[in-house]
Amino acid sequence: MQPVLDPNPKNGQKALLTILGAMLGITVVIAVIATVFSP
């Protein structure tokens, strides 16, 4: 059984984590903007 997150992830996994993190961050920013501008 391979661990889900290796201590030293390979390039593919690192890119995947970066993409997922960016998507999550963008979602949070959009949610904050929508909350600020909502009446």
Image (cartoon, rainbow, N blue to C red):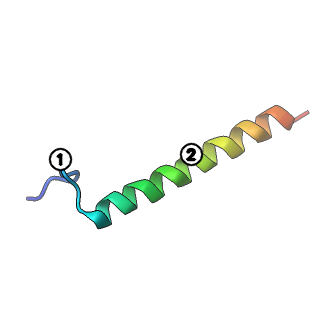
Question: Residue drawn 23% across and 62% down?
Answer: 10
Write down the quadrant of residue 36 in the picture. Answer: top right
Q: Secondary structure at mark 1?
A: loop
Q: For label 2, count other residues whose C-alpha is less than 10 Å away and answer few (under 14), some (14-19) or many (20+).
A: few
Can you identify the residue that label 1 sits on? 7
In percent of width and height, residue 8 lies at: 19, 52
Q: Is residue 34 above or below residue 26?
A: above
Question: Residue drawn 71% across and 36% down?
Answer: 32
Q: Is residue 31 above or below residue 19?
A: above
The numbered dot on residue 35 is none
In percent of width and height, residue 4 lies at: 21, 54
Q: Is residue 15 above or below residue 27?
A: below
Question: Residue drawn 62% across and 48% down?
Answer: 27
Q: Is residue 13 left or right of residue 36?
A: left
Q: Quadrant of the C terminus?
A: top right
The image shows a total of numbered marks equal to 2
Q: In front: 38, or 30?
A: 30
Q: Is residue 17 above or below residue 11?
A: above
Q: Quadrant of the N terminus?
A: bottom left
Q: Is residue 33 left or right of residue 28?
A: right
In percent of width and height, residue 9 lies at: 23, 56
Q: Is residue 25 left or right of residue 20?
A: right
Q: Amino acid at mark 1?
A: Pro
Residue that protrudes farthest toward the bottom in the picture:
12
The numbered dot on residue 25 is 2
In percent of width and height, residue 24 lies at: 53, 48
Residue that protrudes farthest toward the right in the picture:
39
Q: Secondary structure at mark 2?
A: helix
* CA distance separating discs 1 and 2: 23 Å
Q: Is residue 31 left or right of residue 12?
A: right
Question: Residue drawn 17% across and 47% down?
Answer: 7
Q: Amino acid at mark 2?
A: Gly
